[in-house]
Image (cartoon, rainbow, N blue to C red):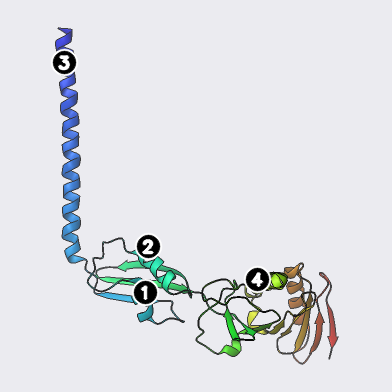
């Protein structure tokens, strides 16, 4: 009797498992049918580009490989984003999103130029993180002009490469540019001279020559520079010696 009951119990368990598998198969088939049917309705008819300045909407769309007529349900985002960044070095990030019922939006963040380096072969546009940028749409007078070192390579999209002998100068610039941006000072800084890494200097507010000195405690020096100029009059000009951290000397001139 016990063996009969045990056999029936095993048969019931096998039957229950079989039913579960059949339900799962039916669910997968139903989901596939829904997706297949949905593809017929979610066909992309419009592709828009947002956030572009350096590149045209056509250039970005072409680089993405996307086109009208594709299914809006296909997982195209990651692939298209990689294509854009590979083809267009000036694009730092690209995001693909769908707007129902039939529109794709490509939102890009470009690596914009903030400085222009003077070299023997001509000007080189640099981003905040010192990558070489291919173009700049705007008034180049707004860019910070840099001089004082000579790059080895200026390949668009790559970080600027410099000789080992000038790596200290380059490291100084890579630290300074983001700080100027963070503190809202970049637009007021011009003609940055790195010929002497111990005596970096630049023009500030069009009225002051700032001597920043060595690459040490730069954030403290910039904070102090802002405090000093805030207490000077609109007609004041001269030299601001910030070469020693926590000290600042204004020399009228």
Closer to the chain start, of discs 3 and 1, is 3
- The residues bearing labels 4 and 2 have C-alpha atoms spaced at a distance of 30 Å
Q: Residue 84 carries which label?
A: none
Is residue 172 among the parts visible in the rendering? Answer: no
SS of the residue at dot 3? helix
Closer to the chain start, of discs 2 and 3, is 3
Q: Nearer the viewer, mark 3 or mark 1?
A: 1
The crowding category of the residue bearing disc 3, from other C-alpha atoms within 10 Å (few below 14, some 14 to 19, many at least 20), is few
- The residues bearing labels 4 and 3 have C-alpha atoms spaced at a distance of 76 Å
Closer to the chain start, of discs 4 and 2, is 2
Q: Which of marks 2 and 3 is in front?
A: 2
Q: Nearer the viewer, mark 2 or mark 1?
A: 1
Q: Which mark is residue 78?
A: 2
Q: Residue at x 18, y 26 (%)?
A: 14
**Whether residue 66 is situated above or below residue 187 in the rendered picture:** above
SS of the residue at dot 4? helix
Circles 4 and 3: CB atoms closer than 8 Å: no
Left or right, 157 with respect to 152, comes to: left
The crowding category of the residue bearing disc 2, from other C-alpha atoms within 10 Å (few below 14, some 14 to 19, many at least 20), is few
Farthest top residue in view: 1
Is residue 110 among the parts visible in the rendering? Answer: yes
- The residues bearing labels 1 and 4 have C-alpha atoms spaced at a distance of 30 Å
Q: Name the residue under label 1.
A: 63
Q: Name the residue under label 4.
A: 174
- Find residue 173 and report its image quarter: bottom right
Closer to the chain start, of discs 4 and 3, is 3
**Whether residue 76 is situated above or below residue 197 in the rendered picture:** above
Circles 1 and 4: CB atoms closer than 8 Å: no
- Find residue 100 and report its image quarter: bottom left
Q: Name the residue under label 3.
A: 7
């Amino acid at each position: 009797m016990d063996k009969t009951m045990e056999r029936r119990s095993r048969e019931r368990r096998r039957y229950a498992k079989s039913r579960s598998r059949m339900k799962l198969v039916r669910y997968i088939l139903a989901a596939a049918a829904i997706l297949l049917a949905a593809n017929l309705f979610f066909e992309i008819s419009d592709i828009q580009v947002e956030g572009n300045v350096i590149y045209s909407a056509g250039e970005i769309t072409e680089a993405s490989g996307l086109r009208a007529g594709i299914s809006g349900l296909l997982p195209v985002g990651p692939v298209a984003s990689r294509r854009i960044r590979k083809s267009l070095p000036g694009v730092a990030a690209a995001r693909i999103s769908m707007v129902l019922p039939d529109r794709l939006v490509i939102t890009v963040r470009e690596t914009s130029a903030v400085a222009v380096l003077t070299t023997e072969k001509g000007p080189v546009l640099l981003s905040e993180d010192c990558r070489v940028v291919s173009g700049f749409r705007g008034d180049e007078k707004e860019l910070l002009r840099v001089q004082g070192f000579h790059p080895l390579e200026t390949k668009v999209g790559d970080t600027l490469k410099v000789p080992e002998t000038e790596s200290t100068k380059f490291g100084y610039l890579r630290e300074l540019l983001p700080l100027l941006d963070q503190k809202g000072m970049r637009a007021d800084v011009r003609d940055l001279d790195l010929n002497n890494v111990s005596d970096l200097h630049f023009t500030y507010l069009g009225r002051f020559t700032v001597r920043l000195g060595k690459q040490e405690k730069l954030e403290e020096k910039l904070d102090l520079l802002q405090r000093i100029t805030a207490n000077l009059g609109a007609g004041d000009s001269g030299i601001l010696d910030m070469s020693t951290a926590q000290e600042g000397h204004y020399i009228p001139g």
